[in-house]
Amino acid sequence: MERTIYRELKPTPQLWFVAFGLVVVVVAALASVIHVEHRGHIATGMTNQIVWGLPHVFAIFLIVAASGALNVASMASVFDKTQYKPLSRLSGLLAMALLVGGLAVLVLDLGRPDRLIVAMTTYNFSSIFAWNIFLYTGFLAIVAIYLFAQMSRGVTSEVVKRVGLVAFLWRLALTTGTGSIFGWLVARPGYDAAIMAPLFIAMSFSFGLAVFILVLVALFRLSERPLSDQLLYSFGRLLAIFAAVVLYFSAVRHLTNLYAAEHAGFEAFILAEGGFQTVLFWGGQVLLGGVVPIAMIFHPTFGKTRQAVLLASVLIILGGFAHIYQIVIGGQAYPMPLFPGYEVSSGFGDGAVAQYSPRWPELVLGLGGVAIALIATGLGAKVLRILPTNLSDANMERQGGNG
Amino acid sequence: MSREKLSGAELNRRDFLRSGAAVATATLAPGVTLMAFGGSEAEAAADAGKRWGLLIDVGKCAPDCDACVSACADENGWKGQGNPETDAQWIRKVTLKNKATGHEASMPVMCQHCEQPPCVDVCPTGASFKREDGIVLVDKHICIGCRYCMMACPFKARSFVHEPVVNQKTHAPRGQGTVESCTLCVHRVDAGGVPACVEACAATGNGAIIFGDLRDPESEISKRLAEYPSVALRPDLDLNPGVRYAEL
């Protein structure tokens, strides 16, 4: 049986080309931050009605995907699926990188990003945001220890398993915290639901694995290392199951809302009358991000191809963006009932659906977060022994890793 | 000597010392105060024995009158740029139409100064805070501009400062990139006065807004609340706002 050998990425022209492109995006994002800082948030499409916009959609996607990207490591060390073990290191690295990218977007969109030190030193513990600061920094620390344990020669697999268990429990807490940012908002009809926490956990499993698959394939292609088809197919099947779980929790969320007359207006907005939001829900989240990739993966012939797994991953990421956009923007656009039983109107959009058109600084900042996550992943794989040299089908079988 | 006759300076000093904030606070110039190690002048001036509130008589509020809005903007220096979506709106006029009867009413909506303010609960740094006398404020020194309070407020009472600010008032500091809302004219209240909107409404002859101490059973606002029916906005949330509406 051949041992798994981990080696740094070799600097090839393609690698430098990709890195250069990503750095350009990050520089553009920083320029947009300076622009917004100088002119104020008037330079964005965000308003006093839609107070969280595209940057938050990107940030939440990246943060949710971060915890999900740790799935592969968790499956290997906590659930003893040894065939995933060679990819545990990449799983941990990607999880940290995505979180850093997401947090960067969140922090750089603050009205006063220069006051980050205030956020790190002054806490109000009745705020889930304050708890999240600990959940996020704690996640980075625990996954770093997890990665170190995996890469150290002297650490036994029993210790790795225990650290892995802590990391797994922590990532569940982290995504619960992220979902609760919305779940605990009592004022808005689109939020205020306990199901937000498990829904976000399901989303993290699905989006995180989709991002992991694409990054894995890209890194192996850039470094010209063989990658097992069987491994990809097994990731694909897992991805389809996670996507189905997201659909399930979404269905429960909306059906529960439909049952309560007070939420009928919001549900009508999302499911039927909301224009772009309705298109995002049915077309983006349900169809492109759910039904189509699931059908592709379970298709008897097409499902057994790399293209199916890669396309399904791309669709689930796009559907995931649509899903988060519809939660973040849709939840704010639908008017709050200022006085139940009355129709409200004012010069400040009371009683009316709020409009939102994102502007380029927001989009560039969001893409900057994605670029930061990808650069951090590539840099990690370049300087650390993260990626196995050979994950060909033959090599995987030789290792007999079917756990 | 009754409380009201005490000079502002004496009242401030006593409350100030009690708050423990004195050691950490230095006045640099009129209106400019350096604060460190927690506590603030605004908090120190609050009297825990009081709860300030407003009673808005919707029956007396004229639909075409916005004297309260203009007075607030003048008093606190938040005049907008003509873009209602991004301009600060500490107070706004809202029209309510009863879905069943078609009856219409007009009334001002501002920060409701809740007893259980969701904005204070969700603020990660504690910049949103409630004084002991019930006035909900934003500490502009520690607001990081995350806008979570705006997500949480059921009344859309808070505004994010989207553009550079000019012509600030020393008693109502504002800052680009931070969140702000009705302060119940805390600078006037601490000096024994009434909020600008109340004064302006009285000057029009409508007299639709009454300001007073909800804890004092002898205050006009408490007597009126005890005598006539009134409602709170979003009563389903059980936030016990300090602003009440009557004759709706």
Image (cartoon, coloured by chain):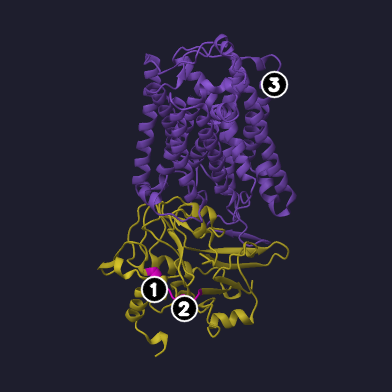
Q: Which residue is mark 2?
A: B203
**SS under mark 1:** loop
Above or below residue B180? Residue A361 is above
Specify few, some or many for label 3: CA neighbours under 10 Å numbering under 14, 14-19, or 20 or more: some
Q: CA distance from mark 3 to mark 2?
A: 74 Å
Residue in the foreground of this view, choosing between A171 and A15: A171
Q: CA distance from mark 3 to mark 1?
A: 68 Å
Which numbered circle lies on residue B45?
1
The amino acid marked with disc number 1 is Ala
Q: Which residue is mark 3?
A: A298
Q: Quadrant of residue A179?
A: top right
- Write the residue at 53% across / 82% down: B216
Between tags 2 and 1, which lies in front?
1
Residue in the foreground of this view, choosing between A234 and A284: A234
Q: Is residue B151 visible?
A: yes
- Write the residue at 58% across / 22% down: A82
Residue in the foreground of this view, choosing between B89 and B229: B229
Q: In the picture, which chain is yellow?
A: B
Q: Position of residue A332 (x, y in %)?
A: 56, 49
- CB-based contact (under 8 Å), mark 3 and mark 2: no
Residue in the foreground of this view, choosing between A160 and B106: A160
Q: In the picture, which chain is purple?
A: A
